[in-house]
Image (tube, helix red, strand yellow):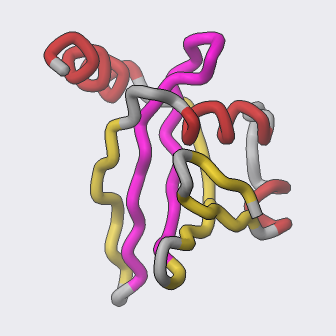
């Protein structure tokens, strides 16, 4: 279990193995970032996902997908780089925050 801002996150082994070119510490840094933009993600048959848009300490823009488990606990289910369009939206949000 990993904690960011007092929120417990769990991480399944399959989700760690599915990271493509992203290190686990970068995902943790994004979740720890002071500027995090939570955005609703996909809802597939009642399986809701929240995405956290943030930058790593090195400035890498990532989208981390999490799923609410129970209480305050969330499960990290994936992470990826932002597309060019997503990065433009995120940068605008950062500037207007």
Q: Residue at x 47, y 81 (%)?
A: 71
Q: Quadrant of residue 84?
A: top left
Looking at the picture, does residue 96 appear above or below residue 67? above
**Main secondary-structure element of the magenta-colored stretch:** strand
Question: Which quarter of the rendered picture does the C terminus lie within?
Answer: top left
Where does the image place residue 95, in percent across and percent down from the top left?
Answer: 21, 11
Looking at the picture, does residue 49 appear above or below residue 60? below
User: In screen coordinates, is 12 left or right of 48?
Assistant: right
Where does the image place residue 92, in percent across and percent down from the top left?
Answer: 20, 16
Question: Which quarter of the rendered picture does the N terminus lie within?
Answer: bottom right
Q: Quadrant of residue 73?
A: bottom right
Where does the image place residue 13, in percent across and percent down from the top left?
Answer: 85, 66
User: In screen coordinates, is 59 left or right of 2?
Assistant: left
Q: Quadrant of residue 76?
A: bottom right
**Residue 11 belongs to magenta span:** no
Q: Please identify the residue farthest to the left as the structure is shown.
A: 96
Looking at the picture, does residue 92 appear above or below residue 78? above
Q: Residue at x 36, y 88 (%)?
A: 45
User: In screen coordinates, is 33 left or right of 14?
Assistant: left
Q: Please identify the residue farthest to the front as the structure is shown.
A: 6
Which span is picked out in magenta?
Answer: 47-68
Where does the image place residue 14, in percent across and percent down from the top left?
Answer: 80, 67
How many numbered tags mark residues here? 0
């Amino acid at each position: 279990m990993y904690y960011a801002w007092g929120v417990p996150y769990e991480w399944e082994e399959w989700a760690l193995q599915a990271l493509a070119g992203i290190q686990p510490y970068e995902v943790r840094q994004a979740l720890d970032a002071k500027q995090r933009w939570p955005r609703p993600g996909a809802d597939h048959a009642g399986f809701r996902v929240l995405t956290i848009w943030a930058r790593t300490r090195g400035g890498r823009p990532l989208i981390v997908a999490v799923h609410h488990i129970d209480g305050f606990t969330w499960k990290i289910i994936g992470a990826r780089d932002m597309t060019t369009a997503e990065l433009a939206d995120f940068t605008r949000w950062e500037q207007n925050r």
